[in-house]
Image: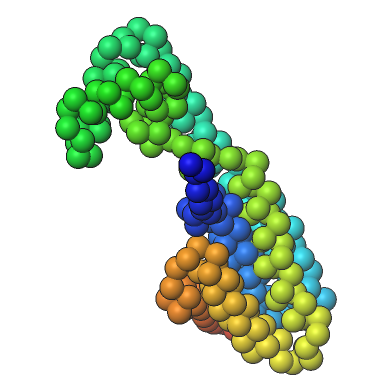
Amino acid sequence: MSRLHHPESHLVQRIGWLRAAVLGANDGIISTASLIVGVGAAAGTRNEVLIAGVAALVAGAMSMAAGEYVSVSSQSDTEQADLARERKELADSPAFEKEELAQIYVERGLDRALALKVAEQLMAKDALSAHARDELGISEITTARPIQAALASAATFSVGAALPLATVALTPFNTIVPSVSIASLIFLAVLGAVGAKAGGANAWRAIARVTFWGAFALAVTAGIGKLFGTVV
């Protein structure tokens, strides 16, 4: 009798790169557009606006990459420390570790005899992986990947930041503030929809969330730019 194979692709497998990508693109659009709108509202020239936008793109991409790498590396270091501790405990007290794993399965609904059998069989195959997954919550899907997170954040930040910059280059200078604001909110709405679709979430909720905070950031920086422009 042949076995049926039913390969599945779960959305949670995307969580590592998706979080970094959405964060990078969202930050790229909002921070660069806000800076452009602030400088534009302060009556800067087109060149000043473009220079500020390009500087925001480069500095932001580097900052995102460094921030993600350091943050996710810290998570990775913690995971490795936990695994090293677990490896030592397995070597020193295998019977206790088996009992500990079995108790986890009992709490999930298995009867004690079956839980002990499952723990014994899983530990015979790969004791560290069994404890990492079921005791520590570390798996191949959720494990920290610092380089992947850093590259995803830097790349998507650059793409996001390039969109309001392109709007500056393609619109008349006297309409830069409203043009960049409207275009950026559209970009954010599209990003929210794409991120929601990739993650299997509600698109309208994601769109409302990103556009609200984007509009808030743009309004605040435009107000500050206008205030400083008037004072100067």
Horizontally, residue 140 falls left or right of residue 95, namely right
Measured as percent of width and height from the top left, residue 192 is found at 53, 72
Q: Nearer the viewer, residue 97 or 151?
A: 97
- Residue at point 36%, 22% (across, down): 121
Q: Nearer the viewer, residue 24 or 99?
A: 99
Horizontally, residue 60 falls left or right of residue 81, namely right
Q: Is residue 36 visible?
A: yes
Relative to 156, say whether 84 is above or below.
Answer: above
Horizontally, residue 216 falls left or right of residue 35, namely left
- Which quadrant holds residue 138? top left
Q: Nearer the viewer, residue 59 or 65?
A: 65
- Residue at point 70%, 76% (across, down): 164
Measured as percent of width and height from the top left, residue 48 is found at 78, 74
Number of numbered labels in the structure image: 0
- Residue at point 44%, 27% (across, down): 129
> How are the residues colored?
rainbow
Q: Nearer the viewer, residue 179 or 92?
A: 92
Relative to 224, say whether 55 is above or below.
Answer: above
Measured as percent of width and height from the top left, residue 91 is found at 39, 9
Q: Quadrant of the C terminus?
A: bottom right
